[in-house]
Structures are given as C-alpha cells and as structure tokens.
Image (spheres, grey):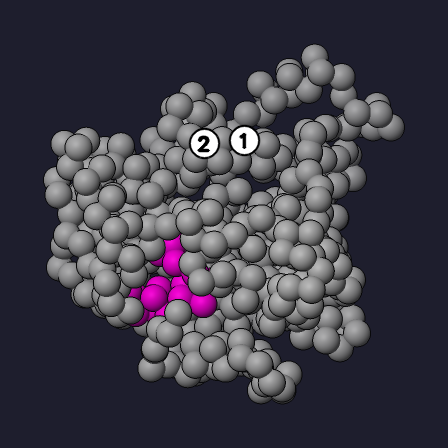
C-alpha cells in the first residue's frame, strides 16, 4: 500500500521498513515529544447514551467487529471504510439484511478513512487495518474528537507510542488497544486468582504468541491471506518480537504493570530464520524467489523483562513453524502456579503436582471472573475467539456508556507495543539490555490496579 501521512513518527516507521535503512535511522530515543503531562489512567469521559461506531478495515477482523457491535444494546454501526469498496459494501448489505440502520460507506481511496474520522455521525473509531496504519489512524481520530480503539499492535515504534500517549492527554479522548486475550476465560480466571491472593506474591510470568501462520503469510488475497502480503513484507525486514501483546497483556494485568509496578529493562535474543524459507521452498519450489529470499525475522524470539519490583516475564514469538498454538499464559507466585495450554493449577500444600480435574473444576467455579460468570454463555453464543472478542466489546461499550475508565489505558497499550522496537534493538545488539520507557512518567507508583470488572 502507498498510504501517505504527514507526521514524523509514521514517516520514520515507513523509512525503517524500507530496504537499506541503517539501524540508527530506525531506532528512536526513549523521550516524549514534550507538552503538558497529566496522568489519565483513570480517564473518565462524558457518558454516551448511544455509541455510534465507525469501522476502518473490513478484511479479516473488521466484519466480526461489525457483527458484534450490531448486537449490543445502545450501539449503532454508522460508518464503514475499506480500501476495497466491495468489502465495505458487503458489510453494509449485511447490516441492512439484519434490519439495522444503513451505515455510510467510505471506500476506494487511500485516505477515505479520514472522512470517516471527521464524520459527525461517529463517536468511536474502530481500527482493524495493517499494523503500520494503526497509530496514525488512531492519532487522527483522537484529534478529530473521537474515541479510538485499535487492533494489535497499536504502534510499532517508540515515537508512535509517545505520540499516542500525548494525543490522549491533550484531547482527553479514550484510546485503547483491543487486546482480546485479556478477556479470555482462562486469563480472567488467572486474574481472579491473583486478585484473591490464591497464588501468593507474584514474581514470574510467561507469555507467548506461538502460532503457525506460514500459510497466511504466503497466501494471496483470494486464498484468504493478507492484502499485498503486508505481514510477510514486515517480517522480511524486521527481527525481534513484532507481535508481543496477546500473551503479554494478561500477564501485565496479573502483575499490576503500570499500576504498582513497571518494566525496567529487557534483553531479547532470536534464532536464525529457518521456517519461512523451508515452507516457501516446499510450496513454490526450491529455486523460487520466495524460497531464496532472506527474511529478517528469527523463527523463535525469547525476551526477558525485569520489573521495578524484581519480577521477571518471559515473552516468546514464533509464527514460522509447525507447532500447536500457545500463549503460555503462566503466572507463578509464592503459593502456587497457573499454567495454560492446557490449563493446569498447582497450589500449596500439594504444589508438587497439578490439581486433578475435580479440584480444578471446583477452583474454576469458586474463582470465576464475574464478567465470565455472568456473561460467559452469551460470549460463547456470540463467538469471536471463544467469546473473548464479544466480551471485550461489550465491556468497552459499557464503559463508554457509563463514563467509566477503560480496562486497558493508553499507557498499557503503548507499553505492551513498545516491545516491537525494543526487542529488535536488543536482538540487533546481540541481546544487549535495553531500558523500557516509563510512559506513565511515574504515575505507576500511585495508579490503582485493575479490579474484577463487570458490565453492571
């Protein structure tokens, strides 16, 4: 895509995505762009009796968002946007068939999304476009007076992270990364165990996005792949961990990161690349351009983060190999441990072995998160990654309609995404330690932990 944006961070992002650009030109410093500071972890905005949503990007994830929003009370999808007009028309027709109000369509031009953001008929802009567009589109929407939410990652450079933070602080509009895994049933159970002190004092977590995406990366649009192979193109130019948040977000919530603790530094190491070339050789032939191409992304990336309170977090990434899916989702405390894929729990005084199925079922019933306990049936019926997508949007809409702070603040969103640039920097320096910015500027010391939230 040849999208053009007049802002320094995104231009830098495009620049370091190009061939032949030096590392020094790609990496930005851990500094803000300046301006007045006000902690908005608990940002509360005027309640919206009716939430009017505009969705930008109607490829893989956008249609699901349209369908979920259309089933929530007090929500109307008023605008749709995609570079490909047929995608937007497909969703407009779906809404009309469901006897929903007909939305406006903005499509066919590379800047059509700006018209959606500027529309007076939109309160919330929902962004599901390729990674490099998330931050610039979110920033533009905020400056247009809209609340904005973005698929993951919401930013790929530190400059983008800082500009998102400062734009929220200046506009006083919500921005939230749509980390749906924070709303998974097992993740919310783990959060409940942590909040109730069942695991004791927490000191280590493990997170991952280990997911075989070889087919999707090499598939064309008709086969269900990414438009213009954008994900493969990104992985051909970048190393480190480009997609850290699915496993990391929940672990950060368990540990109260940004709300009592913070990341201090990390070190990151990647293996060489093997899987993409091997897959390409078998699909296209060993002499094909795809098989002979060099891909910067190492197959397995391991990152270790140390926090101000002396805790550690392991974060893994592998999307290039044959393997079962896992986010690890492990949290260790002084009284016990929860480990996922499959879900297992071990607690004192019998912590040397995993609970049997009966005890685990009893634990799940006793400590079920209220959001899942009350809404789990509806979540499963509506679907979306096992119901987590539905619960995320239902909770988001509830907060907007009731003037409540969002569960994932802009500080959380950008911190989790800062690993995209920081891990690449560490990998390229042979695993050297890299400091992590404090996007809260010290507010983490007094910010309150996320509670066991519900939808009233």
Is 276 placed above or below 110 here?
above
Crowd tier of the residue under label 2, counting other residues whose Cα lies within 10 Å: few below 14, some 14–19, many 20 or above: many
Q: Does the magenta stretch include residue 132?
A: yes
Crowd tier of the residue under label 1, counting other residues whose Cα lies within 10 Å: few below 14, some 14–19, many 20 or above: many
Is 286 placed above or below 358 here?
below
Quadrant the N terminus occupies:
bottom left
- Residue at the far right: name it: 352
The residue drawn where x is 49% and y is 76% is 13
The residue drawn where x is 24% and y is 55% is 85
The residue drawn where x is 74% and y is 41% is 332
Q: Position of residue 331 (x, y in %)?
A: 70, 41
SS majority, magenta: helix
Residue 112 can be seen in this image: yes
Left/right of residue 14 with respect to residue 98 in the rendered view:
right
The residue drawn where x is 49% and y is 63% is 230
Q: Is mark 1 on a helix, strand or loop?
A: helix
Q: Where is residue 427 in the image (x, y as percent from the top left)?
A: 73, 71
Q: Is residue 390 magenta?
A: no
Q: Position of residue 137 (x, y in %)?
A: 34, 66
In this rendering, the count of numbered labels is 2
Left/right of residue 212 with respect to residue 405 in the rendered view:
right
Residue 402 can be seen in this image: no
Calculate the distance from the C-alpha at mark 1 to the C-alpha at mark 2: 8 Å
The picture quadrant where one finds residue 50 is: top left
Is 342 placed above or below 110 here?
above
Q: Name the residue under label 2.
A: 387
Magenta range is 123-142
Q: Which of marks 1 and 2 is nearer the N terminus?
A: 1
Between residue 163 and residue 421, name the one nearer to us: 421
Q: Name the residue under label 1.
A: 185
The answer to whether marks 1 and 2 mark residues whose Cβ atoms lie closer than 8 Å is: yes
């Amino acid at each position: 895509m040849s999208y053009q944006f007049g802002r320094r961070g995104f231009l830098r992002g495009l620049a370091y995505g190009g061939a032949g650009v030096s590392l020094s030109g790609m990496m930005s410093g851990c500094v803000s762009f300046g301006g007045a500071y006000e902690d908005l972890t608990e940002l509360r905005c005027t309640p919206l009796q009716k939430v009017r949503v505009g969705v930008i990007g109607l490829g893989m994830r956008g249609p699901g968002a349209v369908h979920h929003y259309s089933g929530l009370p007090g929500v109307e999808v008023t605008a749709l946007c995609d570079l490909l007009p047929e995608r937007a028309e497909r969703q407009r027709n779906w809404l009309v068939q469901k006897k929903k109000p007909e939305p406006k369509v903005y499509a066919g031009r590379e800047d059509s999304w700006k018209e959606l953001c500027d529309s007076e008929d939109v309160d919330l802009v929902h962004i599901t476009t390729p990674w490099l567009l998330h931050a610039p589109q979110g920033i533009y929407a905020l400056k247009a007076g809209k609340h904005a939410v973005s698929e993951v990652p919401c930013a790929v450079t530190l400059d983008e992270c800082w500009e998102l933070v400062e734009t929220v602080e200046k506009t006083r509009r919500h921005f939230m990364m749509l980390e749906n895994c924070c709303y998974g049933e097992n993740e919310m159970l783990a959060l409940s165990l942590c909040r109730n002190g069942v695991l004791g004092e927490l000191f280590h977590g493990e997170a991952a996005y280990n997911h075989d995406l070889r087919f999707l990366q090499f598939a064309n649009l008709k086969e269900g792949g990414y438009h213009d192979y954008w994900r493969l193109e990104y992985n051909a130019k970048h190393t480190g961990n480009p997609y850290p948040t699915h496993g990391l977000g929940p672990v950060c919530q368990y540990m109260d990161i940004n709300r009592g603790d913070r990341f201090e530094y990390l070190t990151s190491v990647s293996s060489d690349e093997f899987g993409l070339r091997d897959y390409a050789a078998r699909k296209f032939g060993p002499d094909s351009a795809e098989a002979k191409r060099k891909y910067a992304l190492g197959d397995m990336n391991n990152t270790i983060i140390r926090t101000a309170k002396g805790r550690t977090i392991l974060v893994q990434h592998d999307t290039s190999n044959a393997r079962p899916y896992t986010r690890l989702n492990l949290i260790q405390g002084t009284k016990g441990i929860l480990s996922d894929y499959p879900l297992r729990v071990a607690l004192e005084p019998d912590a040397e072995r995993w609970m049997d199925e009966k005890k685990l079922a009893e634990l799940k019933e006793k400590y079920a998160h209220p959001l899942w306990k009350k809404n789990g049936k509806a979540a499963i019926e509506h679907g979306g990654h096992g119901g987590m997508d539905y619960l995320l949007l239902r909770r988001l809409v509830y907060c907007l309609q009731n003037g409540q702070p969002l569960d994932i603040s802009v500080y959380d969103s950008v911190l989790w995404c800062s690993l995209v640039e920081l891990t690449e920097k560490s990998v390229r320096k042979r695993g050297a330690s890299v400091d992590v910015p404090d996007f809260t500027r010290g507010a983490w010391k007094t910010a309150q932990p996320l509670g066991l939230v519900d939808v009233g």
